[in-house]
Image (tube, rainbow, N blue to C red):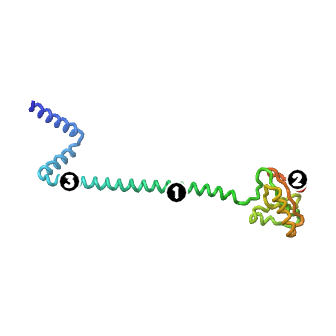
Amino acid sequence: MRNFLVILVTLGFFFNNTVQAQELTKTQKRALKKEIRTYKKNPEKWVKMLNKHDAKVKELNDEIAKLNAQLKASELAAKKLAEQVKLEQLRYVELEKTIPTTKLPDGTVYQVQMGFYQYLDLVSFNDKLKTVRAEEIDGKKRYVIGHFENLLDAVQFSNDIKRIGVTDAFVTQYIDGERNMNFDAYEELGD
């Protein structure tokens, strides 16, 4: 029985080697045989080669671990930066809402008309004073200032403008960007 097992193991070894040997070219077989002979003659060289390979594998595994740690740190930093970008974008949107504009908002708003002049031209100030706007009507310019959602605030501002010498100032009403020419602030307040 014991002999049978030894024969079976030997046959398995030879069968396994022949399958692998069939895949090698003649040149590769010769090189492999030469290498095996060298290691049989000098087993210490075989041990040194194994140790060298083990050291190289350990070195490469350490490098992979280090690179994985760097990758993880980079991904974490990228995630933090993405969150910061998102917060800055939200902040930008909020700040953008606070920028004064000459565009009339939807709904009812009130503006103070400072005058209606043919020769006075303040259009060059539109970019500097975003809430001052010039409307050209029949070759003349009508200047309005402010967007007041509350009629009382607009009337108060109009009175302040009159006190500093702009006697033509009065409150106008705009609904969805269109001026209501029939609006009278004092009649509206009287109701």
In the picture, measured across the screen, residue 176 lies left or right of residue 25, that is right
Above or below, 64 relative to 118? above
Give the number of the disc on residue 81: 1
Q: Callout 3 environment at 10 Å: few (<14), some (14 to 19), or many (20+)?
A: few
Q: Residue at x 12, y 53 (%)?
A: 42
Q: Callout 1 environment at 10 Å: few (<14), some (14 to 19), or many (20+)?
A: few
Q: Are marks 3 and 1 in contact (CB under 8 Å)?
A: no
> What whole-number distance in Å separates the C-alpha atoms at marks 2 and 1?
53 Å
- Amino acid at circle 1: Leu
Which badge, 3 or 1, comes first in the chain's sequence?
A: 3
Of the pair 41 and 83, the residue shown nearer to us: 83
Which badge, 3 or 2, comes first in the chain's sequence?
A: 3
Q: Residue at x 34, y 56 (%)?
A: 63
**Foreground label between 3 and 1:** 1
Residue furthest to the bottom: 164
> What whole-number distance in Å separates the C-alpha atoms at marks 3 and 1?
47 Å
Q: Which residue is mark 2?
A: 188
**Foreground label between 2 and 1:** 2
Q: Callout 2 environment at 10 Å: few (<14), some (14 to 19), or many (20+)?
A: few
